[in-house]
Image (tube, helix red, strand yellow):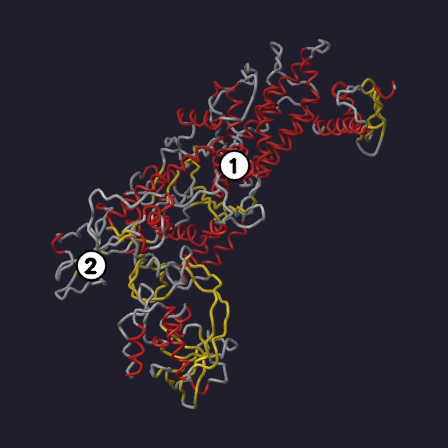
Amino acid sequence: MNTAQTSFSSNILAPANAPEKVSVEGLEDKWGLVWEKDGVYRFRREANRENIYSIDTPPPTASGSLHVGHVFSYTHTDVVARFKRMSGYEVYYPMGWDDNGLPTERRVQNYYGVRCDPTLPYVEGFKPPFEGGDNKSSKAADQVPISRRNFIELCDKLTVEDEKQFENLWRKLGLSVDWTQTYQTISPAAIAVSQKAFLNNLSRGEAYQSMAPTLWDVTFRTAVAQAELEDREQPGAYHKVGFDGPDGKVFIETTRPELLPACVALVANPDDDRYKHLFGKTVKTPLFEVEVPVVAHRLAQIDKGSGIAMICTFGDVTDIIWWRELDLPNRAIIGWDGRIVEEMPDAIMSARGKEIYAELVGKTIFSAKQRIVELLQESGDMIGEPKPITHDVKFFEKGDKPLEIVSTRQWYIRNGGRDSDLRDRLIALGKDLNFVPDFMRVRFENWVNGLTGDWLISRQRFFGVPIPVWYSLDANGEANYDAPLVPAIETLPVDPSSDVPAGYTESQRGIAGGFIGEMDIMDTWATSSLTPQLAGGWIEDPEKFAKVFPYDLRPQGQDIIRTWLFSSLLRGEQEHGQLPWKNAAISGWILDPDRKKMSKSKGNVVVPAEPIDNHGADAVRYWAASARLGTDAAFDEGQMKVGRRLAIKLLNAAKFALSFEVPAGATEVTEPLDQAMLLALAEVVREATAAFDAYDHTKALELSEKFFWTFTDDYLELVKERAYNAEGTLTAAQQASAAIALRKALHVMLRLFAPFLPFATEEVWGWWQKDAGSIHRASWPVAEELTEGIDAGNVGLLDLASIAVGGVRKAKSDAKASMKAAVESATIEAPAAVLTSLRLLEADLKSVGKIQSLAYAEGDEVAMTQIILAEVSEA
């Protein structure tokens, strides 16, 4: 923890001005306006680097729907930010909006009923068919085609509206974000940062272009990276198909018979005795009569199907590996739209094969499969009926149809998938990063070690960061992809689809001897991976960037360790040669009450505004903060009710504690019980601080809350008669001791709770410490505030008093008597050494328990015994 504390003045003896009736209602609006007006959370950039704590805040997808999971994880970050600010740091806590990419495009399509067609001209003043409402449709056939520029204008318009909703939610929740430090992942500044990083990658040889098999989403018609894949269980069927071999039929079992025209080989495991005699020989494909070799490869599974498989270009990721490692030809037949392409593989020579292929052209994968199966059954090349199965199929995480593999020219960034030295450096950096909790580190390492290729960053979409290159055209109009034209860094941002490279004019676009612009945009993670640079002002404000980078904290969800955390760490290593942050705080999942992960597809998402409206922001924050990092937590309104009760109790207890006058000139806490309470609270401060320093906010909350309830249930009851001194029988010092102890304890407890209950604590602070400024700029408490001048020998007395009070309460409850009922006599039993300490508490114990006569006896443990109620004895 930083030893330099925020400078503020406080006076615990200051008069308080509590309202007649306290309430948590309306505190969010009241204090939100004050914090904004006073700039409480404004980053003070004049601070030295060692006194700055910077947070690489996750930029929420502005086009995504809000759910209570956002509240859960962002609260975890906010309690840390508030703790660090109170610990003397200037906290750099920006907020970004992740605007670009497929989620925004899809939302715009559905919201406005449009789709992008780059071939169409721009329409000035275009009005979409509708805006939201019940008419929206996700079917492309129902959507009006519009130009790319018109489409991007609608994207810009809708994201602004979505961002307002997020900001309103964050403000209502009480996030201590500096709202002057915001950014968008599609703003000109963000585009410039992303393009500069790409050009630096290109100049260092870390970015390259390649024509290669690519995982492809046929709905969105874009390439998909490994990090965006997800396996989904789908129905399928095995088809037993015979190839003509040198010794008769060779049967394979395949789920993709429609790829027979793309078959380039059969493959079996080199140790499979059934097929060793075929290695090096050829077989002929059914229907198309193409001779293909039989090859051996270690990935062929002896116990799967017939043990021999066909290699097609391309049915799955394993086909790509076989194709690449065995140096096989490419006979791709699937187009960008997921239909069979018109261009027939040259290897198909027979008249019958050409006739069948011509029949397949333009068909979807499903229709082509149906027709091929019919033909195989007619020809006798398929044995039996298809055998139904379920198997894992790769999907784009945001897609609705299985991915296909097509050959396309794409841009890649080296990520260690094919470079062991880079992979080792990334693993080493991961070991230097403090993962909280630590077991999340293995997810990062497993991802890095499991990479099979470089990071595919180009996307064939519209709303995103343009890849900043052009290509010269030769005399025949052919593009020179091997020597892209690049802009100067100072000219960024650029859009190659409308900007012109140096040395050319717009009139030369698309003509022989001229140029063409790159039309692809970057994968959204290629921009999001640069949030440290975006938020810190890498290009725009290098002075600020030097003060906040590397960041102290990257908070994020566990599901994007493989995407956001990994890609950010990769860019940090490539651009700066270091980690972009020191700590990574990983939140768990938010589950529904049945312990199932919330998702829109399951229909179990809770809109976050509802629980905040129903229970209050402090209550919702309490629920969120009750879960540790990396731990899943259920949506629990019962826990929110507990949080609301805590906030209300804090207001009431504070009003009560501040209601006692402190005798003039009194400044000391002299009574043993009061000193014991402060000593117990000092230990809470030590442990809560250590917990926060270890990013265990939940333990800090638990410690503070446990003490608070002991304070209100036992200590307040024990000392209130002394603090009132209604009968005037006590000395001024005895009364003052109670009143001052109450104020000291309240002053510390408010600050302990401030990160969790920012509204209730600010409310109390405003009654009493208004001249000291916001509680959220006050110093985090230290134990020495409470222990100075206190007799350490009184430690533990509060626990003893609580046990004794509990015994009296139980006796009255068992007798069904009022808690105010008088006790004629009672005996405290305890070990001899403890009895001496308990005698120090006699006056307060007799007062709270209404005990007329209190005796002492030795016993094995502390207990209140032989309790005789006055009413009973008189009866």
Tell me if mark 2 has few (under 14), some (14-19) or many (20+) residues whose alpha carbon lies within 10 angstroms of its own: many
Q: Going by the picture, which residue comes out furthest to the bottom?
A: 247
- Residue shown at 38%/79% (left/top)? 375
Q: Residue at x 27, y 48 (%)?
A: 151
- Name the spot of residue 111 as percent of width and height, x first: 35, 46
Q: Quote the CA–CA distance across marks 2 and 1.
A: 54 Å
Q: In percent of the image, x 50 and y 70: which residue is there?
A: 389
Q: Quadrant of the C terminus?
A: top right
Q: Secondary structure at mark 2?
A: strand
Q: Quadrant of residue 268?
A: bottom left
Q: Is residue 604 visible?
A: yes
> Residue flagged by tag 1: what amino acid is it?
Pro
Q: Quadrant of residue 670?
A: top right
Residue 499 position in % (x across, y down)? 19, 50
Q: Where residue 838 sits: x, y (%)?
A: 77, 25
Q: Is residue 534 above or below residue 665?
A: below
Q: Is residue 796 left or right of residue 610?
A: right
Q: Is residue 22 left or right of residue 140?
A: right
**82 and 264: which one is in front?**
264
542 vs 631, left or right, is: left
Mark yes or no: residue 51 visible. no
Looking at the image, do the residues carrying marks 2 and 1 touch, with CB atoms under 8 Å apart? no
Task: From the viewer's side, name the closer residue of 591 and 445.
Answer: 591
Mark in front: 2 vs 1: 1
Residue drawn at (46%, 85%) of the image: 276
User: In screen coordinates, is 386 left or right of 372?
Assistant: right
The residue identified by callout 1 is 611
Label of residue 471 in the image? 2
